[in-house]
Structures are given as C-alpha cells and as structure tokens.
Image: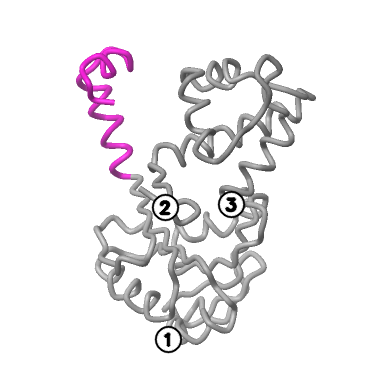
Amino acid sequence: MVAYGGKRKISESTIRRLSIYYRVLSILEKENYETVSSKELARREKLTPAQVRKDLSFFGSFGTRGLGYPVSELKDRIAQILGLNKIWNVALIGVGNIGSALVGYKEFQRQNFNIKVIFDNDQRKIGSNHKGIKVSDIKNLESDLKANNIEIVIVAVPATVAQYIVDDVVKAGIKGILNFAPVNLKVPGDVFLRNENMSMELEYLSFALRNFMNPSEMDEKGIS
C-alpha cells in the first residue's frame, strides 16, 4: 500500500492499473477519441467498469455520467498522479547485458525517466561512451549521485554484490530503487524498492504451461 496525498492508502494493484489506463488512453488519443466510457476502458483490458470507476475515484472526480471521460484530460491527470509530468533523473548501475539494454530503452525517455549517469566497476568500460552516456567509476557512486541530482537508481548487477551496492545507494539519500538482480534486498522503511525478476516471470510461465490448459483455468483455481 502507498499513501496518496498523505492520507489514503492506495494498493499496488490500483497503481498498476493506473499505468494500464494511461497506456490505453495514449492509444485512444492517437486514434482521435475525444471521450471514452468506463465500459470501453474496462473492455480493452478485460476488467469491469466498476473496477475502473473505483480505481479512478481514489484520486478525485473524473468525467460526466452518460458522457464518459475526456481522453486527453484523463490521460494528463493520470500522468500527473503517476508523476510522469516531470523529468526524473535516473542512474543505472551495471553495464552488462541487462544494463546495456536498459540504457537503450527509448520508452524511459518518452516517459520522462532520464538516465543521466551510468556506473560500472570494469576498468575497460569506465570512461567510455555508452550510447551517449559516459560510464563512471562505481567508486565515485555517492558523490556522483548527489552531483547529478539523481532521484531513482536502477540496479543491474550480479546478485552477490547487489546488497552492497544498494547500501551505498541508500547512503547517498536515494529513495527509489528498481532492482534487476535476482536477490531479495533489504532497504530502510523510507526507501521504495521494486524488484524485476525476469527468471521468476519465466518460471511462472513454465509452471502455467506445464500444469494448465488455459489462463481461465488458472483463474478458476485461484492461482492468478
């Protein structure tokens, strides 16, 4: 649960659905839709209209009964709620296969996540230009994070060193961390940590394909 406006507690599932609504609204805007109903938003993502209305109600009053939601206005409001209406300074630690791919991920830039500095401990990479960004020495992590006003750090390092790296990131005052290392990390209560474990997602798929005939069967058995 995440506090919104210092009062209401918003579930992670609601926040994830807001991201989905934002993407759907972006598509509708490109398709020149001026308004959209909760029914149409729900249909596109296999939700219920009641769920859509409930999610949006946490953040205020939107749309007009019988007329639907103004697409561009709702998209901009959700962008504001999600913090996408400002540029976030991001640092990436680890220029291996995953890290290198993340540097070149154009969606980050479109969503205002600006990878401003990248770090590694490989002397062959330090000082080189990697997709337009100079690779900095991990030894200067704390000072460089502060000098570049970094707000979010992406960690893409081996599991064996991830906790040490995250400890240093926390010492530098960073409150938002996205972890790609396949390990459970410990952070203080005032730090937001998100884990992206691709191996676990593939294991979920292999389990599903091995044990079930179709996704609806998993839903019926309460596994989704």
Tell me the number on the disc at residue 42: none
Q: Secondary structure at mark 2?
A: strand
Left-right relation of 223 to 12: left
**Residue 125, placed above or below residue 32:** below
Q: Secondary structure at mark 1?
A: helix
Of the pair 109 and 45, the residue shown nearer to us: 45
For the residue marked with disc 1, what is the amino acid? Answer: Lys
Which stretch is magenta?
Answer: 199-224
Sequence-wise, the earlier of marks 1 and 2 is 2
Which-is-in-front pick, marks 1 and 2? 2
Of the pair 200 and 153, the residue shown nearer to us: 153
Of the pair 106 and 146, the residue shown nearer to us: 146
Near mark 1 (Cα within 10 A), the count class, few <14, some 14-19 or many ≥20, is: few
Q: Is residue 117 magenta?
A: no
Left-right relation of 118 to 24: left
| Residue that badge 1 annotates | 139
Residue 38: horizontal and vertical position, in percent?
A: 58, 20
**Residue 168, placed above or below residue 70:** below
Q: Which residue: 35% across, 47% down?
A: 1
Query: Which quarter of the rendering shows the C terminus?
Result: top left
For the residue marked with disc 3, what is the amino acid? Answer: Tyr
Q: Quadrant of residue 173?
A: bottom left
Tell me the number on the disc at residue 3: 2
Residue 41: horizontal and vertical position, in percent?
A: 58, 22
Please tell me whether the stretch drawn in magenta is mainly helix, strand or loop: helix
Of the pair 173 and 120, the residue shown nearer to us: 173
Q: Which residue: 52% across, 56% down?
A: 102
Residue 132: horizontal and vertical position, in percent?
A: 67, 68
Marks 3 and 1 sit apart, C-alpha to C-alpha, by 26 Å
